[in-house]
Image: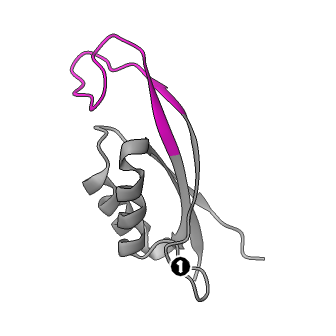
Amino acid sequence: MPLVKIVIYTPTSHADKIRQALAQAGAGHIGNYDSCSFSVKGVGRFQPLKGAKPFIGEAGKVEEVPEERIETICPQEKVVQIIAEIKKVHPYEEPAIDVYPLLEI
């Protein structure tokens, strides 16, 4: 079963909700463990454009937000379902979510 790595950037205020949604949707299962993930804190930067409805900030102003990068793995066949679950709890209008294929070695 091929695996992918999912990486999500979220405000630190929503990191636990994202991790919980990931685990409930079937991500982060490694051997006899579940809810596996790795996080690192940083600063996200963005500028909402005209017509945006940002969770944080206002159109035309560059924002800096304390964020957490959360990464985990999941079966490739579940990635669409897992991303849908992330979007249900993620506060951003346009969440940054990356998906990477993993090599089987």
Q: Quadrant of residue 1?
A: bottom right
With 88 as the anchor, is 46 left or right in this view? Answer: right
Q: Residue at x 34, y 68 (%)?
A: 81
Asked whether 87 or 102 is in front, the reply is 87
Extreme top residue here?
Answer: 60
The amino acid type of the residue labelled 1 equals His
Q: Is residue 85 magenta?
A: no
- Residue 93, position in %: x, y? 28, 37
- Residue 19, position in %: x, y? 43, 61
Counting labels gives: 1
Mark 1: few/some/many CA within 10 Å (<14, 14-19, 20+): some
- The secondary structure type at the circle numbered 1 is loop
- Residue 36, position in %: x, y? 55, 71
Q: Residue at x 59, y 77 (%)?
A: 2
Q: Quadrant of the C terminus?
A: bottom right
Residue that badge 1 annotates: 29
Q: Residue at x 42, y 72 (%)?
A: 23
Q: Residue at x 28, y 54 (%)?
A: 89
What's drawn in magenta, residue-wise?
43-68
Asked whether 68 or 98 is in front, the reply is 68
